[in-house]
Each structure stands twice: as structure tokens, then as C-alpha cells.
Amino acid sequence: MTVPRVLEFVTVKRNVPLTGRSYGHWWLELDEDESYGWWPARPVGLVGLLRGTGGVLNGLGVADGGSPSRDPNHGLLADYEFHPVLLADRADRGVRAALRAFARDFKGGWRWSTRPTMNCRLFQLALMDAADLVDGTGNYRTRGAGCPALAPIRRGAARLDGRRRWPTNLPRPGQQVAALGLPAEPARCPPGNGPEVRWTPS
């Protein structure tokens, strides 16, 4: 099999966060009827956004339309959509199996931060790492410039020294999520909401 190659049966979808409107959402669609995304295990306001909460695959129990193999946003248009590039000599069925196994076995919290923490963005990147997929040429920009509330600070700093700032809460191009050294942190669920969940890099 030729590598690298673009996988037409996998679609990476990314909605950017917009201050005051949405935290954004990243998910991955596989074929026509399967998709995977990471959601907060309960509705979050500003405190939950910053302190974190448990995470759940495909919004199960939180968002309408989610199932173990389908993100609630499945089939919707996204701000950015593209087919990822496979870097390993792996058959299509092996890619599908790797994506399904990672999504099925994943456990972790959900938190938005200016440093690397688990949320839908890092979940999608870790899912892609599990199947040896990358954004591909020209698609790294779809990761966005970071927190929109901090955009004026980044623009000001760029004007001063002429350097582009990569989002500090995402891996740099070519870096895998596991290399970020995320601690296995307990999900911050209220007492009595089930077992403690921990994210561990695979």
C-alpha cells in the first residue's frame, strides 16, 4: 500500500470557538454513519469550563442524538472539513479498527484551558494518533489560533516581535498528544455520579 495517502472515508470536522457563542467542537466522521467526538459529561458554564468535569464519548446522556458510535453533530457542516493523511502502511480496515478501539476504550475528563487538557480537540488529535493519521498539508491552520478571548494579546505580541504564536494548549505540528505529558487527572464530577475516570495516554 502506498503511504502517505489521503483517506477519503475519514472526515475531520472542526468548529472554531467563538467568544460568547460556542466553545466549538471537533469530531471525526468515519464512512457515512459513524463518528466520534468528546463532550463534557454535564452542561458547563464558566466555572465548569475552567475547573473541568468528566468527559463522555459522543455526548451520551448530555446531548440529543449521540450514541456510542455517532456524535450528535454527525453529518453537519463544520467550519473546517478535510480528509486526513495516513502515514503508516495500514489497510483501511486496520484504520477503522484502530479508530473504533481508541474511541471505545478512551476514558478522561473534559476541560478548556490555555495549557494542554483533555477536551474535544485533544481527543480528536489522540484519536488520529492512534490510527497514524495527520492533518496533512495546509490543514494545520484549521486548529485555529487558540482561545479567541486571548486573540488581542497574541496579535499585539506578534506586532512587537513578528513571530506567530501557536496555541499552547495543542501539540505543535508533528507532535503527538502522548508527547505532551498530560497528567492522568481525575475527572471532576460531583459526588455520587459514578466512578472516578482517569485519562491515560495509550
Image (cartoon, grey):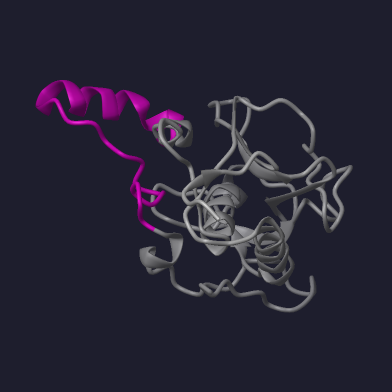
Name the residue furthest front. 1
Residue 180 located left or right of residue 82: left
Which residue corresponds to the image point at 63% horizontal and 25% vertical from the top-left? 21
- Quarter of the rendering containing residue 181: bottom left
Q: Which one is nearer the viewer's eye here, 113 or 83?
A: 83
Name the residue furthest bottom. 195
Residue 162 located left or right of residue 197: left
Residue 11 located left or right of residue 164: right
Check if residue 171 falls in the magenta segment.
yes
Which residue corresponds to the image point at 72% horizontal and 60% vertical from the top-left? 93
Residue 178: percent from left, percent from top = 44, 67
Picture layout, residue 183 above or below residue 52: below
Q: How many marks?
A: 0
- Quarter of the rendering containing residue 22: top right
Residue 38: percent from left, percent from top = 67, 53
Which residue corresponds to the image point at 27% horizontal and 23% vertical from the top-left? 155
Residue 133 located left or right of residue 54: left
Q: Which one is nearer the viewer's eye here, 24 or 69?
A: 69
Picture layout, residue 70 above or below residue 153: below
Residue 139: percent from left, percent from top = 46, 33
Q: Which one is nearer the viewer's eye here, 55 or 106?
A: 106
Q: Which one is nearer the viewer's eye here, 23 or 145?
A: 145
Which quarter of the rendering shows the N terminus?
A: bottom right
Residue 73: percent from left, percent from top = 77, 37
- In the image, which residues are magenta? 146-175
Which residue corresponds to the image point at 70% horizontal and 42% vertical from the top-left? 9
Picture layout, residue 129 above or below residue 47: below
Check if residue 158 falls in the magenta segment.
yes
